Image (cartoon, rainbow, N blue to C red):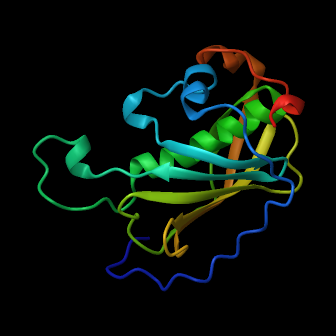
Amino acid sequence: ELSEALPEAPAPNVPPLSDGSSFSMSVRDLYRRWLFHGPLFEGIARVDLIGPSGITSALRVSTPQAWIKGVPSGRWLIDPLMFDSGLQLILLWGRAHWDMTTLPSGFQSLRRYAAPAASEVICELRIRPGTQVPNSLSDLYFLDAHSRRLIAVVEGMQGTSSKSLNRIAGGHAVAAGQLS
């Protein structure tokens, strides 16, 4: 349902990523080895933490003017770069923990509270309990990088993983124990 006015954003209720550690692969290598996205969709700016229960990262944002020729000034309702980059984190998580490429297959809800930030957003991916090979279930929290105000939440994101899909990316996964 779309409405004229956005609801007031609740306080972010993001579960802590207590099992997270630094990710040793550079973003450039991540796109070269594990992801298959071209330059326009390379929206992961950095990966701060990764662990069994999720990822904390920074994502780039886009404007309609940068993507569509001749578009007058304006902003996205839902930034396609921000949203797709959040989905890319699910793929990253699957490769890092299962050595399988995970493709999103559906979600329960998307709640939008604010326009995308002007420069970058923080994305908190949290893996839900009960996730097991080959199916993941997660939530994505998009936060303004400066104010930490909630921009949007995707709840119940489903992903399906397969080792055979690893061929769509450039390289071979690093064993999960070698990430830090």
Asked whether 26 or 136 is in front, the reply is 26
Residue 157 in the image, given as x and y percentages of width and height:
66, 52
Q: Quadrant of residue 91?
A: top right
- Rendered image quadrant of residue 159: top right
At a point 42% along the width and 46% down the height, the residue shown is 81
Quarter the N terminus occupies: bottom left
Q: Could you tell me if residue 110 is visible in this image?
A: no
The picture places residue 89, in percent across and down from the top left corner, at: 63, 43
Query: Looking at the picture, does residue 40 appear above or below residue 170?
Result: below
Q: Is residue 130 among the parts visible in the rendering?
A: yes
- At horizontal 77% and vertical 44% (from top left) the residue drawn is 136
Q: Count every numbered label the image shows and give the total.
A: 0
Task: Name above or below for residue 99 compared with residue 53.
Answer: above
The residue positioned 57% from the left and 45% from the top of the image is: 46
The quadrant the C terminus occupies is top right
Relative horizontal placement of residue 164, taking residue 29 as reference (left or right): right
Q: Nearer the viewer, residue 8 or 124?
A: 124
In this view, the residue in front, 37 or 121, is 121
> Residue 148 at what x, y percent from top left?
55, 73
Between 35 and 109, the residue placed more toward the observer is 35
